[in-house]
Image (spheres, coloured by chain):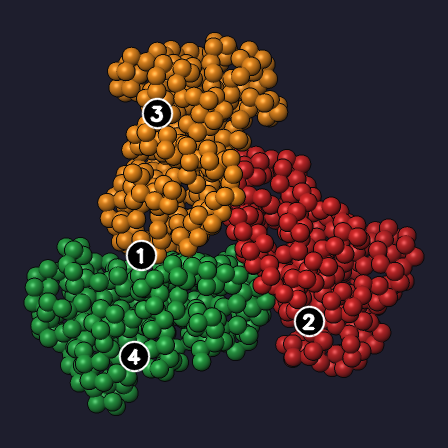
Chain colours: A red, B orange, C green
Amino acid sequence: MLKGRNLIEPMDLTLEELDEIFDLADEIIKDPRKFIHACDGYLLTTLFYEPSTRTRFSFEAAMNRLGGSVIGFSEPNASSVAKGESIADTIRTVACYADIAVMRHPKEGAPQVAAQYSDIPVVNAGDGGHQHPTQTLTDLLTIRTLKGRLNNLTIGCCGDLKFGRTVHSLIKALSRYENNKFVLISPEELEIPEYIKKEVLKKKNIEFKQVRTMEEAMKEIDILYMTRVQRERFFNEEDYIKLKDTYILDNEKMNLAKEDMIVLHPLPRVNEIAYEVDSDNRAVYFKQAKYGMYVRMALILKLLGIY
Amino acid sequence: MLKGRNLIEPMDLTLEELDEIFDLADEIIKDPRKFIHACDGYLLTTLFYEPSTRTRFSFEAAMNRLGGSVIGFSEPNASSVAKGESIADTIRTVACYADIAVMRHPKEGAPQVAAQYSDIPVVNAGDGGHQHPTQTLTDLLTIRTLKGRLNNLTIGCCGDLKFGRTVHSLIKALSRYENNKFVLISPEELEIPEYIKKEVLKKKNIEFKQVRTMEEAMKEIDILYMTRVQRERFFNEEDYIKLKDTYILDNEKMNLAKEDMIVLHPLPRVNEIAYEVDSDNRAVYFKQAKYGMYVRMALILKLLGIY
Amino acid sequence: MLKGRNLIEPMDLTLEELDEIFDLADEIIKDPRKFIHACDGYLLTTLFYEPSTRTRFSFEAAMNRLGGSVIGFSEPNASSVAKGESIADTIRTVACYADIAVMRHPKEGAPQVAAQYSDIPVVNAGDGGHQHPTQTLTDLLTIRTLKGRLNNLTIGCCGDLKFGRTVHSLIKALSRYENNKFVLISPEELEIPEYIKKEVLKKKNIEFKQVRTMEEAMKEIDILYMTRVQRERFFNEEDYIKLKDTYILDNEKMNLAKEDMIVLHPLPRVNEIAYEVDSDNRAVYFKQAKYGMYVRMALILKLLGIY
């Protein structure tokens, strides 16, 4: 029963609950127009304490395509917080107006605090470098739909594996399904954190290896998850410039991969995927954005208890 | 007949018109989903020349929950006014697109000017320190619903009674009903202005007293209206700091009050109500925010002539 | 067949396609409420890389009045472009969420680039000093509706004819209809560019004359198209001040004109039309804004293939 629940961390949902959401997303994908009045009269609020156009668009599109409406702010400047209001008061006030809240916040834990004070469902749309559970839902739905399964997969993760929260969440999420393997492709400076290796992978006896080049990984992987090397995670410009161009996917590398391999990317990309790759059928990152909207539609319907 | 009317000052409405709005609000509260298509195809525009997230949210939520849509700006920077456009031209242009306009403006009288040039209803959502009539409607509906009447009440007003426009409007509004009394709780520096005492209270022979402590008032009041001590109203920081913490409501003070007393606050609060009070059933300030949405729904329906 | 098409330049549409749009606009004007659910479940995105409240309002109102929803940004700061995303990637992502995109961009050609990468229709809502095709549609629908025809007209264009893109587009558009004549009223410094005279007017043997005063033109024209003298087009303040007050329309000049002459203006005006003119029946610039909404409603329905 998902009605009234919050979604703060990807692990808040059991595998059965994930299936429930994905099954509904499948239904929506098959016939989106069946759902255009499902949320008539319902209201979603987007509380974005830091800007994130893409995530905001995805939630707004999801709610609008269900017939629901959206109110919100996309940066905190114009909001009441300037008058010294606490998150507890803000959420209790918007809960008077809206039926479900989506919060993005630069501080880790802020959505959790909001959820404690809210009597409407709160969805975490990213809190600092911490969690972004609907991105993980997006990734899982994309894989489930395009590969037909969430188990028995070899997943290559490439780029910034140290700071990239989407990769951490994806590894944790896919570790819950049987017989998945990971190939972790990164420079030494951006390796996956020790706690993920120890507390997730080793603890569950999950096969993984760490490599330095994409070429070593391309042949065996079913999924290549590319990530952006974010300038804002670096302390000095020199390190950023040295590393950002190291792990760029191009057609030459794509030629090494399986015919049914798929390339995912949370977007926006900077230059880690060459434009020439876009026309390759295996490049599914724009489709992935679309699945992101569909999975949010399903999530909204479930949390509101409409489906 | 409220169709096509403007709402610039709380006193623009007769007691009969207020009842008409409140009666409709009651109907909406009883069955909100009955109204989710009432404004299908109608458009409200929010012209916010200064930010006020809460007020904007309340109007947007009201219109959206009626099936209507909203266009607008929430600060003037991004608007055509930067190109030197007058309020007269702006309102005449948006009147081509929208069916009803809500205006917030830092200058007193701006919504009145807009109304003169507009052929759609204009609602004042706050003009400087002047008027904010839908806040008054909110306060009245909250009292009417929770106390069952708008007369025979003893109302305590606490905090900044000098600059707080919501209190001024509330006193004027409640002075129109029979046998209401006021207890005005404030430091000397923030006393109610002389003209309210003279032109409203004394003129109508309304009983009132002025006290310096909350303790003196708590026992006898039916309603405690708390207000924020707004930093922006002070000329120097020292005065602000000295006074802002003086009139804080906490559980100790609540213990002195009647069992059916209710606490209102226009929100956002800073620290004038301790968090511990929130769990007291008599603390109704979040409910009040919800009544604010309902009364705006009723107002929109009346001004558009739909109900 | 307009379904799925882009609108980048006014000349992208044949005269037959224009008629198709205007005929639908006529239907909407006759009975707007017939269309309030036409776009239920459809989504328009406004990608405004520079602010333009009026244009944004007009598109948002159009989509909302058709029952559709809008997502978007009104300035680029809060958008993913800050993270270094290309227009190609932005449009491909929003095309996952929305059914039609409206783009405003300070750089000429940006909407054309977007259209190349988009699989949803892209409408240019202004690219630098270049094109603004829906303004031209607005002007044409206004003339067609109020004069009953788009041919056999004498059109006076007044003000900044050098930099004013709306005038250039209007001249090109009206040059496609039979027997139209132009009177070009401007100071020498702001004369119509040579290429318009040569490649449009002379090439098509269209009668035109250039005059320095409004008085010379008023008697013979059927339409007076006034334009704003935009400060931002000038390199020095002195030139701006000298010229901006030169071509001001007032009642005295209106007295010289035909009884069925109409005055158009793309708005916002600064002071090029005296306020006293507003009450003259021939001043139709606010009506024009309304036709702008209706023509955009028709355009959206056509590009989405709904009508």
Q: Secondary structure at mark 2?
A: loop
Q: Is residue A142 above or below residue A205?
A: below
Q: Is residue A107 visible?
A: no
- Give the quarter of the figure containing the C terminus of chain B: top left
Q: Secondary structure at mark 4?
A: helix
- Disc sitting over residue A284 in the figure: 2
Q: Residues within 10 Å of mark 3 (few under 14, many from 20)?
A: many
Q: How many marks?
A: 4
State the image coordinates of residue A279 (x, y, percent, origin top left): 65, 79
Chain to which the residue tagged by mark 1 belongs: B
Residue at image x 25%, y 90%? C203
State the image coordinates of residue B255 (x, y, percent, origin top left): 58, 13
The answer to whether marks 4 and 2 mark residues whose Cβ atoms lie closer than 8 Å is no
Mark 1 vs mark 3: which is more N-terminal?
Answer: 1
Chain to which the residue tagged by mark 2 belongs: A
State the image coordinates of residue C172 (x, y, percent, origin top left): 29, 80
Residue labelled with disc 3? B173
Residue labelled with disc 1? B96
Residue at image x 22%, y 68%? C146
Q: Between tags 3 and 4, which lies in front?
A: 3
Residue labelled with disc 4? C173
State the image coordinates of residue C35 (x, y, percent, origin top left): 41, 62
Query: Disc 3 to disc 2, how far (Cα)?
Result: 62 Å
Query: Disc 2 to disc 1, how far (Cα)?
Result: 43 Å
Amino acid beneath label 2? Val
